[in-house]
């Protein structure tokens, strides 16, 4: 594997963990180190760090808070 890729994986343990969970990426990176940007995108999807996933998570949390507020309001009455 390319030294730049190895260094990058050492500096980013979450992406290194993703590669351990998906060992096919070792082969991809050995053959083409330029696929590192693709690896970053896939790791973001895996960890739920893309913008749509963050918005969805926030929306779900907001919905939960609203539900608890309505429940508290109904218990108060």
Image: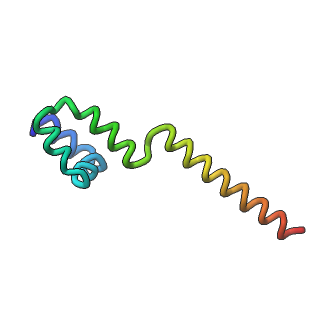
Residue sitting at x 45%, y 39%: 50
- Placement of the N terminus among the 4 image quadrants: top left
Instruction: Report the residue that reaches farthest toward the right.
Output: 77
Color encoding of the figure: rainbow
User: Is 28 positioned to the left or the right of 54 in the image?
Assistant: left
Q: Residue 42: where, in percent of width, then height?
A: 33, 41
User: Is 71 positioned to the left or the right of 9 in the image?
Assistant: right
- Viewer-closest of 17 and 46: 46
Instruction: Report the residue that reaches farthest toward the front.
Output: 24
Residue sitting at x 61%, y 51%: 60
Q: Residue 54: where, in percent of width, then height?
A: 51, 43
- Viewer-closest of 19 and 9: 19
Q: Residue 64: where, in percent of width, then height?
A: 66, 57
Residue sitting at x 56%, y 45%: 56
- Placement of the C terminus among the 4 image quadrants: bottom right
User: Is 11 positioned to the left or the right of 46 in the image?
Assistant: left
- Viewer-closest of 39 and 14: 39
Q: Quadrant of residue 12?
A: top left
Q: In this rendering, is residue 72 above or below 4?
A: below
Instruction: Report the residue that reaches farthest toward the top.
Output: 34
Q: Residue 46: where, in percent of width, then height?
A: 37, 48
Residue sitting at x 55%, y 49%: 57
Count of number-bearing discs:
0
């Amino acid at each position: 594997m390319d030294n730049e890729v190895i260094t990058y994986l050492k500096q980013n343990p979450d992406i290194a963990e993703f590669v351990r969970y998906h060992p096919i990426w070792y082969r991809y990176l050995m053959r083409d180190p330029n696929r590192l940007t693709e690896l970053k995108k896939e790791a973001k999807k895996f960890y739920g760090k893309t913008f749509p996933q963050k918005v969805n998570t926030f929306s779900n949390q907001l919905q939960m808070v609203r539900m608890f507020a309505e429940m508290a309001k109904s218990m108060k009455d």
